[in-house]
Amino acid sequence: MMNKVPVILISGFLGSGKTTLLLRLLAHTRQLPLRPAVLMNEMGEYDVDGAIISEEMPDVSVEGLLEGCICCSKRNELAGALHTLLSQEPDLIFMETTGVANPEQVLEELRSPLLADRLYLVHSISVVDAKLFHEYNSRFTADKELVRTLHGQLRNADFIVVNKTDAASTREVTKVIKSIRKLNDTAKLQTAEYSRVDLEPLLEPVLASVSVAAKPVQVPQPESAQAQRTDAAPSSAPISAKSIGRPGSISRSTAFKVISAHSHSHNHDANQPHSFSRLESLTLHQYSPQPLEKQRLESFLTGLGSSLLRAKGYCVLPHEGTMLLQYSGSHLEWQPTALPVSQGYVTLIGEHLDKASIADQWEQCFISL
Ligand SMILES: Nc1nc2c(ncn2[C@@H]2O[C@H](COP(=O)(O)OP(=O)(O)OP(=O)(O)O)[C@@H](O)[C@H]2O)c(=O)[nH]1
């Protein structure tokens, strides 16, 4: 019988720090050395997080399931994507869910006959934003599906990272831990800044089950761009070029297009438990030949206020070149990238997003005064 491959599932609400944790885990895994693979699930039409990983660690296999959640609309593609990764004989598979996925259904899928013979779950990790946890809980109280998702992410975890403690007060962190403990009093819990947690115990069971000597891998250099990015909070180090998921795959002539609106509720099977109802994602494409005005884009995004929960993407800027844009918790940051992005894009995730107004404001970001 074939050896089963260990899986570590990472869930957590939008922007909580899942990819930040995944990058740390990947760096550590490769130093052991083990050969990891990644299944990345994104709500948007581009695999931003997968691109970040591929750019920093080009030898890591990444399969992206886009424009939907593996807990619902993409659930039937999950087994296929995992089998693609399994064919590359990794030592370990990391799965990062979208911020709005309920891991319950993913765990159920892993137990299905199609997958249970090939995979076994080592950890289900949940990452929480210490600053926004209570705000999101009270904001979404009326949305039972979303509350169930948020709670499901915590209930189904054996390891919980209370992240972004740099942005929260000690009192807030204590309150968050108290609330989490009401939902899950058995999981191991660590507080963290930039998802810096003790990685050894998380990977111990994997090491124990894998014959490392049989699969030598390239150990990354400690001074690599990747090490800088994962060990020093938001990096400004240049990174090597690697082509992104689907660059230039769409040709449009307009300067702005809200080309996809994904509302979770429309993609759910009525018989399945829903993970959330009101949130949607849309992608803005940088089609215009005019330069994108960075300040205007920043004002536009911050001006969306509480409607906007998360934004990320790559923008081609006139002075800086291509930059990775990250927006979460009202905080916007830019990171340089060497990705050969010919057309930039930004994925927005939020609720009550006024598409007409957003399209108009996006267009304004290109008009020189
Ligand atoms: N201040 C602060 N920012 C953080 C911390 N951890 C991550 N970030 C930043 O928060 C943003 C989102 O982090 P990610 O790791 O991409 O979060 P995520 O959960 O993968 O996001 P989605 O998958 O898009 O929901 C990035 O800009 C990170 O640099 C932290 O502890 N403190």
Image: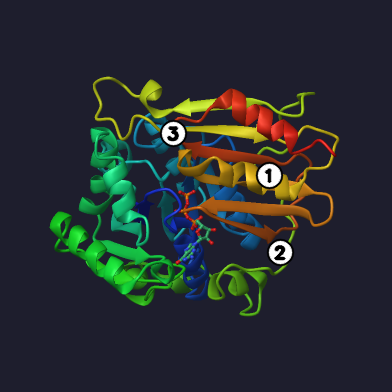
Q: Secondary structure at mark 2?
A: loop
Q: Residue at x 33, y 51 (%)?
A: 135
Q: Marks 2/1: CA distance? A: 24 Å
Q: Which mark is residue 297?
A: 1
Where is residue 330? Give x, y as percent: 50, 53
Of 97 and 200, which appears nearest the observer?
97
Of 317 and 19, which appears nearest the observer?
317
Look at mark 2 in the image and give the residue it sits on. Answer: 239
Quarter of the rendering containing residue 255: top right
Q: Residue at x 46, y 61 (%)?
A: 22
Specify few, some or many for label 1: CA neighbours under 10 Å numbering under 14, 14-19, or 20 or more.
some
Q: Marks 2/3: CA distance? A: 33 Å
For ligand 1, tell me if the residue under mark 3 lies within 8 Å.
Answer: no
Q: Residue furthest front?
A: 369
**Which sits earlier in the primary sequence, circle 2 or circle 3?**
2
Q: Residue at x 61, y 74 (%)?
A: 228
Of 296 and 190, which appears nearest the observer?
296
Q: Label 3 is placed on what type of residue?
A: Glu
